[in-house]
Amino acid sequence: MANIVRTTPPATLALIVANVAIYLLELLFARSGMDAITNLCALHYIYDGYFHLWQFLTYMFLHGNFAHLFFNMFALWMFGVVIERTLGTKRFLIYYFVCGVGAGLCQEVYQFLLGDGGATIGASGACYGVLLAFGVLYPNERIMLLIPPIPMKAKYFIVAYIVLELVSAFSSNDNVAHVAHLGGMLFGWALLVHWRHKGLKDKWRTPSQNKPKESYWERVRKKTDELMDKDAASHTNEHSADYDYNLSKKQNEERLNAILDKIKASGYDSLTAEEKQFLFSQSNF
């Protein structure tokens, strides 16, 4: 657990801690028979008398039960870690809240069109936006499904979820804000497209730029490899120098023998000035 906390990026960790803390506060108020948190912070239908603008932010931190909280926070941790490291902490927070607020707006519009609605709570819309970002930025990464337990590429996983939410939004009465889920994904996609058009894609850090620091032994091995490469290059240079020296020595010996043969045949005076100079230089060895 300590290792998970230590390796989780700050924004993702802070969001999870905040959601858990507020859920515990909800339980405390519920046991006291008070609905103040729900009345003030849940996203109410615009005409029910409890609606306030700040609820577009606060509703994301309320959850109906432990399962609702657990699955949202698990999804946030699973995909938020990667997306925060990719976008950076500041841009990840902007993305998360844009998805959450966008999900709330879509849910309010949907309820307005129906002419009726209740209170909306949960981080699902924002978490669905984070899930979409993973599918957009890492479309070929594989996600292991729970039921059935088979791997699926992220891009197909996202498409399957969108289809499922669309069908559920118009055919089920399960008291789940499916339109909010779709809204979070829609606003997330729009923001990613906006950033991409602004040229921010090249500034996003990929996982290869977030590699863990090298261990001591990895640094030792790398240094040893560098020294071996340097030593091999040194031997190569020495071999090259020896070859050049031996070749020059052989050429000088051949020329000296030719001059000596000329002296033997015609005498010293038959040598040219350059040959006499060469003979003199060789006699100093």
Image: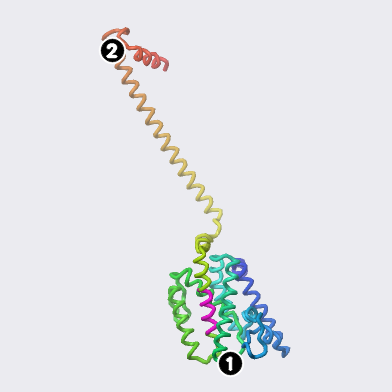
Q: Which amino acid does label 2 sit on?
A: Lys
Q: Residue at x 34, y 14 (%)?
A: 275
As measured in the structure, the alpha-carbon distance from the residue carrying label 2 to the one carrying label 1 is 120 Å
Query: Quick one: SS at disc 2?
Result: helix
Write down the residue under mark 2: 262
The extreme left residue here reads 265
Membership of 183 in magenta stretch: yes
Question: 54 or 168: nearer the eye?
Answer: 54
Please rate how many residues cluster around mark 1, counting C-alpha atoms within 10 Å: few if below 14, some from 14 to 19, many from 20.
Answer: few
- Per the picture, the main secondary structure of the magenta-coloured stretch is helix
Q: Would you place residue 162 above or below residue 205 in this image? A: below
* Quarter location, residue 49: bottom right
Q: Which amino acid does label 1 sit on?
A: Asp
Q: What stretch is highlighted in magenta?
A: 179-189
Q: Which residue is drawn at 53% across and 50% down?
A: 220
Q: Position of residue 13 (x, y in %)?
A: 62, 71
Query: Quick one: SS at disc 1?
Result: loop
The mark lying in front, picked from 2 and 1, is 1
21 relative to 131 in the view: left or right: right
Q: Position of residue 182 (x, y in %)?
A: 51, 81
Q: Where is residue 52 in the image (x, y as percent from the top left)?
A: 67, 83
Please rate how many residues cluster around mark 2, counting C-alpha atoms within 10 Å: few if below 14, some from 14 to 19, many from 20.
Answer: some
Residue 71 seen by the camera: no
Write down the residue under mark 1: 116
